Image (cartoon, rainbow, N blue to C red):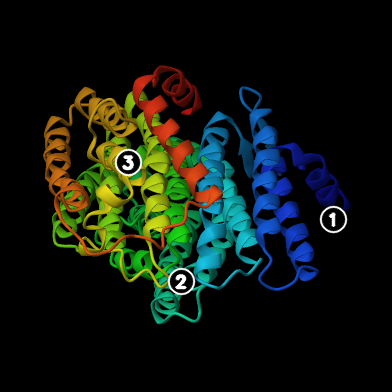
Amino acid sequence: MENLVQTAMQNVNFAAIMPSLVLSCCAMALLLVNVFLPRGKSSLICWLSLGALVITGFFCLGAWNDPRFGFAGHVALDNFATFFNFTFLIAAGLSILMSDGFLKREEFNVGEYYPLILFTTAGAMWMASGTDMMTIFLGLEVLSVSLYILAGFLRNRVDSSEAGLKYFLLGAFSTGFLLYGIALIYGVTGTTNVADIGIYLSANPAELSNPLTVAGMLLLSTGFLFKIAVAPFHMWTPDVYQGAPTPITAFMSAGPKAAAFAALMRILTLGLGGLQDEWTSLLWILAVLTMTIGNVIAIYQTNLKRMLAYSSIAHAGYALVGIVAANEIGMSGILFYMLAYTFMNLGAFAVLVLAGKKGEDNLTLEGFAGFGYKKPLLAVAMTIFLFSLMGVPPMAGFVGKFYIFSGAIKAGYIWLAVIAMLNSAVSLYYYLRVMVYMYFKESGEDFGWVTMNVGAVVSIVLAIIGVLYLGILPGGIMEMAKSAIF
């Protein structure tokens, strides 16, 4: 027993979890600070949360090209995890910036909201840096439990309570698939360490055809595909996105999605690389199904949050193309695309936060009629984000799709790339329709309720800068993405 404890202590390396450790400690400290603040005075917590994200960012920066490993091989703070960590921090920061004014407008200015976002981000970091499936599962649970609460945070609204309940029930159901998959793979290989699983399957190729191994892969993938909102595991997305507070909807569409991609990429490439033929065939079909369902159903949506929900499903399909390609440009393209998508999608939601009335009943196509004339600057910002989501150059969305589709073509998946490009063309209809309503439809509304609060405006400006920078000068970030893949 003494030797086991000694070995465990020698393998502990807090540097490997320092970013998430700092963020978790800050979140717990902010919960205590909130106790001493008057109810409804949570702006201080908002800005302190942003400070916590900045501090965490400095700890992440120190790990670039200086990988840290710890906890007996359960955690790796390598370039892959660090790149994703910055994506999570940006998603959390933009969401927090647009939240202060939103919570005041909804008269639900509760300070616990911000630490929950920080805990969610910490869970995402554990998912990205986890090299053992139990560590990844721990991160997933920390992320998920916090998100269940945040989705139903506005408990005085029926749609928010419904969103939280649906997300909780379906999320718990998908977690069962994930755990069962881990159990089956452990039963075959005798380990939950991702690298050791890969080594075992390489040394014992006969186990690759073992039904338990294949079933474990399928069940394991199901848990992550639910978080990514891949069809047919997407049914929760539109209802949850519509009912959740808009800043949380924005965060869910980027941060947790990127975390699930990070975990799935590490497990499939390092642990289950011997089953590549099987999982590429599966993901090929799911990518086509996801893109098509997301884009086609988005055409019929009149609620903008539901439209962006189905758009998010379609973009998950585009990103899956990179995993199917399983080459350098495809995999690094996913990292680039997750970062680009964070800027363009959160920017679009930030505009919705400012444009929405209390209760957000006006976030429909008709509610946006004439928005371009009444609030021209916000309309221009929304136009930029929609063009990027379409994949129009020189926006970040175009470059991200270019890299991913190029990876598919290079790997020989030409028809998959063609289908993805056709789906991207279909998406032009519902994105352009928003612009038609903004600029070519008249409305009796004067949008007098729109207040340009500092946080939301800053988030929009930062998102525009990110979209244009990644679109015009993508080379530097793409090189970082290439150096981050395995």
Circle 3: residue type: Phe
Q: Which quadrant does the N terminus fall into?
A: bottom right
In what element is the residue under mark 3?
helix
Which label number is shown at residue 1?
A: 1
User: Disc number at residue 385?
Assistant: 3
Task: Give the vertical position of 190 relative to 15 (above or below).
Answer: below
> Badge 2, how many Cα within 10 Å: few under 14, some, many 20+?
some
Judge whether 226 appears above or below 415 on screen.
below
Where residue 172 is drawn, which disc sits there?
A: 2
Q: Nearer the viewer, mark 1 or mark 3?
A: 3
Where does residue 430 sit, x and y in percent of width and height? 16, 51
Across and down, in percent, residue 161 comes to 45, 79
Residue drawn at x 61%, y 22% as measured from the top left: 65
Closer to us: 442 or 347: 442
Between 7 and 188, the one lying in front of the other is: 7
Expressed as whole percent of the image width and height from the top left, the position of residue 479 reads: 45, 19
Q: Residue 229 sits in which quadrant? A: bottom left
Q: Residue at x 48, y 37 (%)?
A: 462
Q: Amino acid at mark 2?
A: Ala
Marks 1 and 3, the one that precedes in the sequence: 1
Work out whether residue 145 can be spotted. Answer: no
Q: Sequence-wise, which precedes: disc 1 or disc 2? A: 1
User: Would you identify the image quadrant in which residue 53 lies?
Assistant: top right
**Of the pair 368 and 190, the residue shown nearer to us:** 368
Secondary structure of the residue carrying tag 2 is: helix
Report helix, strand or loop for mark 1. Answer: loop
x and y percent of residue 281 in the render?
A: 22, 44
Which mark, by number, is residue 466? none
Residue at the spot x=42%, y=47% of the render?
346
Does 11 sit left or right of 472 as displayed? Answer: right
